[in-house]
Image (tube, coloured by chain):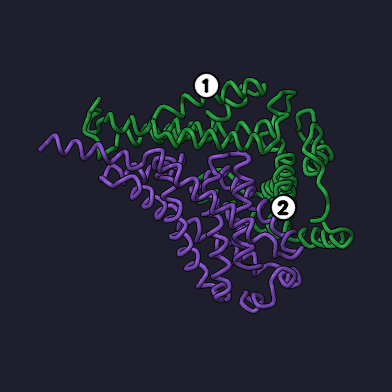
Amino acid sequence: MRGLAVDQNFQVPSVTSSTNALVALAGYLLGAILIIVGVARQFTTSTYALIPIAIAINIVMGQLVGSLGLPIYLDSIGTVLVGVLVGPLAGAATGGLANIIWSLFNPVAMPFAVVAIMIGLLAGTFAGLGWFKRFYFVPIAGLITAVIAAIMSSPLSAFIFNGVTGSGTDAFVAAFRAAGNSILAAATLQGLISDPLDKLLTFMIAYLIIVALPSRLRARFSQSAAASKLPQ
Amino acid sequence: MIALYQHRPSPVHQLHPLTKLAISFGVIVLALGLGVDWVPLVLYLLVLVPLSALARVAGPFVRTSLRILLPFAISLFVIQSLFFPEGNTILARLGPLSIKAEGVRFAFAGTVRILLMAGALLLTLLTTHPGLLLTGLVQKGFPPALAYVIVTTLQIVPQMRERASTIIDAQRARGLETQGSLLVRARALLPLIGPLVLGSLLDVEERSLALEAHVQRHNAQDQPLPSAGPHLGAGAQMVDCAGHARGDWLPAC
């Protein structure tokens, strides 16, 4: 009986074999490319002028926060801004392109493009529902986005990166593994702990920026339907 | 800012960008598809490193791939060899913790997989100018508007970084602390975000007016793109000009 138990345990690591890594990589990458190319042809020139600035805000803010040594990322403020100001599809394109540009410097970021797309899409969707009109809905939108982003990125962490992120938050992974969780469960729980604070702050900062934005500029980006759903 | 690109006269640099991209993804599919733990390491050492040597970028190639790998490797070996509830074969005991053979094997498999994926993509990125890569993609149907976004972003990031450091210096001169406890550093962020983000967004209007004027003169979609030959394509030139105008660091272009 004891031999049988050992054999069963040997099966567990092979659940996250490299074939699964290939399936996860192909699925996530292909999906991201199709979404980015699919939404690209319908934006106005103002949107095309806004997206590069938004991506640069993502990159520079991310580096600034990293250099201050804070335990958050804040590397999707631009994505959320575009999602809220222009709409879900523009937010999705911004997230995806930001990730592609980021992977020109660090190629292991590439598989996570779909997660960035989802953040922009959700920010735009919540704005469309009118959640950015009132201050108290914004943190809730950030928390919901964080939960969905964490659940989306955990299969990538688990199957491609064998459960780690290569950052300080891996201490959570160690704790959950020590408690006997599977790789996928540990990666998911790690995301559910470390993402909410980051996304909550990202959404609130984006909201404050939109409030401070001159109305002339705000009108230039937002489609008339979205304009009434922004804070006055 | 031209990402990781290293300019060298080499046969690998002369290849069409999409050929290199196909090689990169082909190597990744081969390495992961075979499902054997050590295959990625063999492909990295016997295919990618020789190719990078042929491209005369072996130094930056190995250095950059190890720099990317290191944080993952540390996390993997520490976490998965010490905390691997599925494993039973104990190699060594460290007080209450034990190193398990299955965990070490799992960490090794993950480490070499990340090394290979990073290495395969790095080979393309180190030997292909981003502008040239985009030109190649646009020729095969990638939307030109998206190529514009990517090239423009690569130009804006150094400008915005400069703006950020100017703002930091100005706020420091007025007594802002950027070092100290977590709370002090978090508070330092607030007077930086506002001026940086709002200031950059004000540039958008100018940029979009210029873009609208440009689009009215000729429809960008109908423009034939220069072939991806030995000289750089339109996108590459845009990036180059931006770099030279500011006297930025750039390898001989």
From the image, tell me which residue sits under label 2. Answer: B149
Q: Is residue B166 at least partly visible in the picture? A: no
Q: Position of residue A175 (x, y in %)?
A: 32, 44
Q: Measure the C-alpha gap from mark 1 to mark 2.
A: 37 Å
Chain A in the picture: what colour? purple
Label ID, residue A142:
none
What crowding class fits label 1: few (fewer than 14 Cα within 10 Å), some (14-19), or many (20 or more)? few
Q: Is residue A15 visible?
A: yes
- Where residue B181 appears, as percent x and y from the top left, is 50, 46
Q: Amino acid at mark 1?
A: Leu
Looking at the rendering, which quadrant does residue A131 occupy?
A: bottom right
Return the chain for callout 1.
B
Q: Is disc 1 in the same subunit as disc 2?
A: yes
Q: Are marks 1 and 2 in contact (CB under 8 Å)?
A: no
Tell me the number on the disc at residue B46.
1
Residue at the image position 70 percent from the left and 67 percent from the top: A213
Provide the secondary structure element on which disc 2 rests: helix
- On screen, residue B152 above or below A148: above
Q: Which chain is green?
A: B
Subunit of mark 2? B
Disc 2 residue type (three-letter): Val
In x, y percent, where is residue B41?
46, 26
Which quadrant holds residue A125? bottom right
Please report whichever mark, 1 or 2, sits nearer to the chain's N-terminal start.
Answer: 1
Residue located 35% across and 34% down the image: B106
The relative height of residue A169 versus residue A123 in the rendered view (above or below) is: above
Q: Is residue A24 above or below residue A9?
A: below
Q: Residue at x 79, y 28 (%)?
A: B252
**Percent position (x, y) of residue A15?**
32, 42
Q: Is residue A9 left or right of residue B125?
A: left
The residue at the point 81 percent across, 46 percent down is: B225
Q: Secondary structure at mark 1?
A: helix
